[in-house]
Amino acid sequence: MRSAFWLTSDRHSLARRPLLGVALAALTLGLAVYAFDRDWATVALLSPLSDFQTLPRNWFGTGGQFLPSFLHALAISLLLILALEPGPGGRLMICSAWCATALVLEVVQLDDVSASLIDAAQLHTTPPLLAPVENYARQGVFDLADMIATSLGCLAALVSAHIFRRRT
């Protein structure tokens, strides 16, 4: 059985550590945007704490609107690459698949698409796995900047993985 790459010191494992560092930094910065830039009442995991939000918002300025989309795409793509250890073609497939998934979820937030989805969900019993997508469609707001940021995040993950894999 192979040990966790962050616990070993072989050359291949050492080359993976920067990717993990980038992924964790992206997740941390994304959490910071939600903690310091957003109204906690609108953030699912923070809404129970919204009465305690005392700091002024908008620390990240305009970037705070699309930065989480970029960081989320970057981090999830890198974590998938680290978990699956694909070759160059596989890395491209992982980043492309995650980008496509995230873009579809953004399109689901378009008013016409979300209304159709919600109407269809009301006609049928929504399977438990699709209930979060229905809620996402109800509460989300479509933003082209999020689609661009997501695409750039996945591209940044692909480039990062290529750069760090060449060093192994």
Image (cartoon, rainbow, N blue to C red):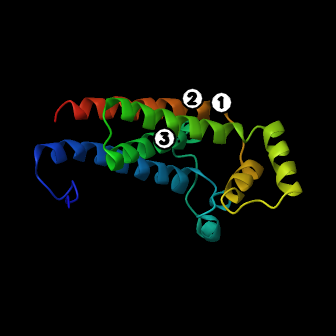
Residue pictured at 43% horizontal, 41% vertical: 77
Structural distance between the alpha carbons of marks 3 and 1: 15 Å
In this view, the residue farthest toward the left is: 10
> Which element type, helix, strand or loop, lies under badge 3?
helix
Q: Residue at x 56, y 50 (%)?
A: 37
The dot on residue 144 is 1
> Is residue 136 among what the camera can see?
yes
Q: Is residue 135 left or right of residue 51?
A: right
Q: Residues within 10 Å of mark 3 (few under 14, many from 20)?
A: many
Residue designated by label 2 = 148
Q: Which mark is residue 71?
A: none
Of labels 3 and 1, earlier in sequence is 3
Q: Is residue 44 above or below residue 64?
A: below
From the top left corner, tell me how far across and down residue 109 is, in percent. 73, 42
Residue 162, quarter of picture = top left
Say which amino acid is labelled 1. Leu
The amino acid on which the numbered mark 2 sits, given as a three-letter code, is Ile
Nearest the eye: 96 or 102: 96
Q: Quadrant of the N terminus?
A: bottom left
Q: Position of residue 158 (x, y in %)?
A: 38, 31
Q: Nearer the viewer, residue 69 or 80?
A: 80
Q: Amino acid at mark 3?
A: Ala
Q: Which mark is residue 73?
A: 3
Distance CA(mark 2)–CA(mark 1): 6 Å
Mark 1 is surrounded, within 10 Å at the Cα level, by few (under 14), some (14 to 19) or many (20 or more) other residues, namely: few
Look at the numbered disc 1 and give the secondary structure of its residue: helix
Residue 49 or residue 45, whichever sits in front: 45
Q: Nearer the viewer, mark 3 or mark 1?
A: 3
The reply to whether residue 25 is in sight is no
Q: How many marks?
A: 3
